[in-house]
Amino acid sequence: MSRKRSSFTLVEIIAVLLVIAILAAVAAPKFVSIAEEARVGVCEAGINEAKGTLAVAYAKAYIAAYKPDGDEDVSELDILAAALGGTPASGVTHTFGDIEITFTIPATPNDTIVLTPSAVTGGDLPTTVPTGTYTIPSQ
C-alpha cells in the first residue's frame, strides 16, 4: 500500500519563504525611495505654486500702491511684504493645498524671498527638504 502525500515538507516551506525573503529584500528599498521622491515632489509643487502666488500678489500690490504722479516712496520689498501679511526681515507661513510654505522675507530691497516647506498635511517632509527662491522684480 502506498500513502498519498497531502502536505508540504519542511524543506519546501523553507525554500518558498527564502525566495519570498529575497524578493522582499530586493524590492523594499525601491518602495522607500519612491515614497521619498513623492514627498520631494509635493514640496516642489508647493514651492512652484507659491512662486506663482508671489508673482500675482506682487503685481496686485504694486498696482494698488502705484502713484501716477511719480511720488513713489514705497519699495518693492515693502509692497510684497504687505501683500504676504508680514514685514521685511520676517517669516510668514501660508498653506498651498497640502503643504505649508514659510516665506522668509529679506531685510533689504532687490533681494530674494526664500521659500521653505515647513509642514505637509497628512504626511512627513522629505529627508532633504527642497527650497526655492523668488526674486523681487526691480522696477
Image (cartoon, rainbow, N blue to C red):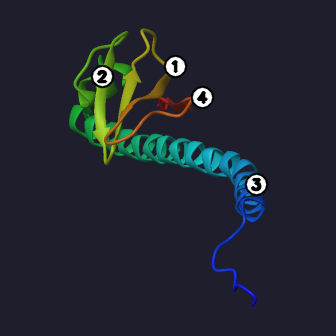
Q: Which mark is residue 18?
A: 3
Secondary structure beneath disc 2? strand
Circle 1 is placed at which residue position? Answer: 111
Q: Sort mark 2 into few (<14), some (14-19) or many (20+) by Cα contacts within 10 Å.
A: some
Circle 2 is placed at which residue position? Answer: 92
Q: Amino acid at mark 3?
A: Leu
Q: Sort mark 1 into few (<14), some (14-19) or many (20+) by Cα contacts within 10 Å.
A: some
- Which is more N-terminal, label 4 or label 1? 1
Q: Are marks 1 and 2 in contact (CB under 8 Å)?
A: no
Q: Sort mark 3 into few (<14), some (14-19) or many (20+) by Cα contacts within 10 Å.
A: few
In the image, what residue occupies the spot 31% across and 40% down?
Answer: 121
In the image, what residue occupies the spot 48% across and 33% down?
Answer: 137
- Which is more N-terminal, label 3 or label 1? 3
- Which is more N-terminal, label 2 or label 3? 3
CA gap, disc 3 to disc 2? 53 Å
CA gap, disc 1 to disc 4? 25 Å
